[in-house]
Image (spheres, grey):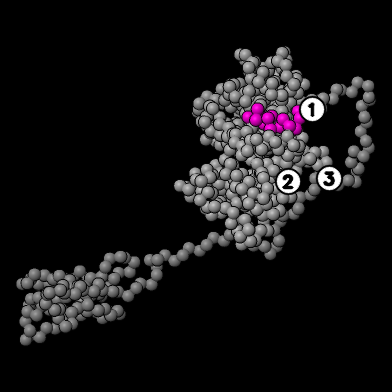
Amino acid sequence: MEQTTAYRALQERGFNYQVTDEEGLQELFAKGPVSAYIGFDATADSLHVGHLLPLMALGWLNRLGHRPIALLGGGTSMVGDPSGRKEARKILSLEDIEANARGIRPQLERFVDLPPAGNGLLRDNSAWLKDLNYVSFMRDIGRHFSVNRMLTAESYRSRLEQGLSFLEFNYMIMQAYDFLVLFREEGALLQMGGQDQWGNIVAGIELIRREAGGSAYGITMPLLIDPRTGEKFGKTAAGAVWLSPERTPVYDFYQFWRNIDDQEAGRLLALFTFLPLDECRRLATLPGNLINRAKEILAFEVTSICHGFEAASEAFRASAGAFGAADPDMGVPTTSRITECAPPDSASELPVEELALAALEAADMAGLFVMAGLASSKSEARRLIRQGGAYADETRLAAGSENDPVKGAAWLSKGQVTLRAGKKRYKTVRVAPWPSPVTAPAPAGPPTCLPRPRPRPVTVPAPASPPACRPRPVTAPAPASPPTCRPRPRPSPVPSQAPPRPPACRPRKGPRPGTAAAPASPPTCRPRPGPSPGSRQTGSPFPPELRSPPRQTPASSPGSGSWTRTSSPPPSTRRWTAGCSPRRTGRSRPSRCWTPPPGPTS
């Protein structure tokens, strides 16, 4: 294909959505090689399917003899593009941006042939953006931008309600400055980008006209929408489809393209493959189930471009082994290298996930699907099992088995199981390490020819050798050691044998509030009730040695309540409080107190 047809090739395949000057671009491509650039911000360590359409545009320019420039946005990633976003992007550190750039660079090199093999170019805008003087930049570059015109851009107008930071407001100026630098240093006359980049591209063209007095051009590409979901193409229930095999396995990447809508096969073949356009149109018109052959070719070609021929061949064989080939007899003519891959007759080439036995035995069935990569979370895995979309060795897992332990499963004995999520997502889980049966040593047969070896003399113990067992050490106690049993503790003295406490009398309660005051010298203990008036005390309940000596009542005080004895008791060796009886030893009976009863003396 000649250089003069490059613009027409892009237009016929569906790359051109908006063009700043169509006639000027046709004349530009007719003159000779054109230097065109597309920018890719390093917001993640990998590009995704949404970036694949601009990458294919660079790839076509590279194949058609033009000079593609892939611009890595190491500087603009520090700001964040507000285009197509409902909220501000996360601010990334310099270390994260550099790490992301290292992951994206090899993906860009798959579409741009760098010297010396090709004439492509890979640049990073951090080389001229990081060290800018802000005041000088605003004076020299910012004066060419009208705020009123910037606010009419779709990328800014859609964010005014949610909120647009001043940092994001500078993104258009920075991207326009990129175009100016590449125009001056690399002779870039064309900038290409997604549909949402129209305002930024036009701003760069205007800056080149005002600052450098030159002419530049711009092309935007259409925004692809999945007709089944209405979302951006490349978005799935599990998230974005990434170009990195660490983020999206090659088999899952292949299956994404294999499962597109039948009506989209022709359009996607033209946009995402390098097959001739006539062949793409012919494959899109295949009747009946042969349309699946067109989707097989699409999936194989895109996977081969992004991951290489070998990886694409393995993914094709694994898919064909699981679901069958769409054209096993190779009856559909095609220039694709898929014809070099004979479809297998078994599912032995399904992607394999090796897991440790301890991890498997500690997991449940929902966790097994998460570890196998067939579900992003345990809640998703549980929902898959409840809805009947989970299989183990083609046996559907019953609802309610999501919490069943893997330990004890029958397939653990053979070391692997084939899991299926939905209709077309397979994964073989294998216990690692699991030795192959052929590696086990064969049992040794009995010796038929060799004589039986004689025992060596060294194996017989010498007569002077020590006994087979060591003598038991003497465990007898030393002479001065204490007896093995502990001495019996002496009984503690009985509390009742303690020396008696001095007798005490219960104090008499004082008068209640509001009553007459007690006499000046009340008895220290409660008086014992005596006989009623007019009666005579005939005896005492106390023994003679504890009785108080009789008191003589003067004749002048008859009826004073005291009484006398006719004989005095023998003197006592103890002294007691008058009117009180002592507490008896060893008993808990309280002491008693008494006073003479009222009445005449005898």
Would residue 581 be found to the left or right of residue 3 on screen?
A: left
The percent position of residue 580, horizontal first and vertical second, equals 23, 75
Say which quarter of the image contains residue 255.
Answer: top right
Tell me what residue is drawn at x 60 percent, y 51 percent.
173
Residue type indicated by callout 3: Pro
The percent position of residue 28, horizontal first and vertical second, equals 71, 38
Does the CB distance between marks 3 and 2 fall below 8 Å?
A: no
Query: How many neighbours does mark 2 have within 10 angstroms: few (below 14), some (14-19), or many (20 or more)?
Result: some
Element on which disc 3 rests: loop
Does the CB distance between marks 1 and 2 fall below 8 Å?
A: no
Alpha carbons under labels 1 and 2: distance apart: 67 Å
Tell me what residue is drawn at x 26 percent, y 68 percent.
590
Which stretch is magenta? 1-14
Residue type indicated by callout 2: Gly
What number of labels is visible?
Answer: 3
Q: As displayed, is residue 87 above or below residue 495?
A: above
The residue that label 3 is drawn on is: 467
Q: Nearer the viewer, residue 527 or 33?
A: 33
Query: How many neighbours does mark 1 have within 10 angstroms: few (below 14), some (14-19), or many (20 or more)?
Result: few
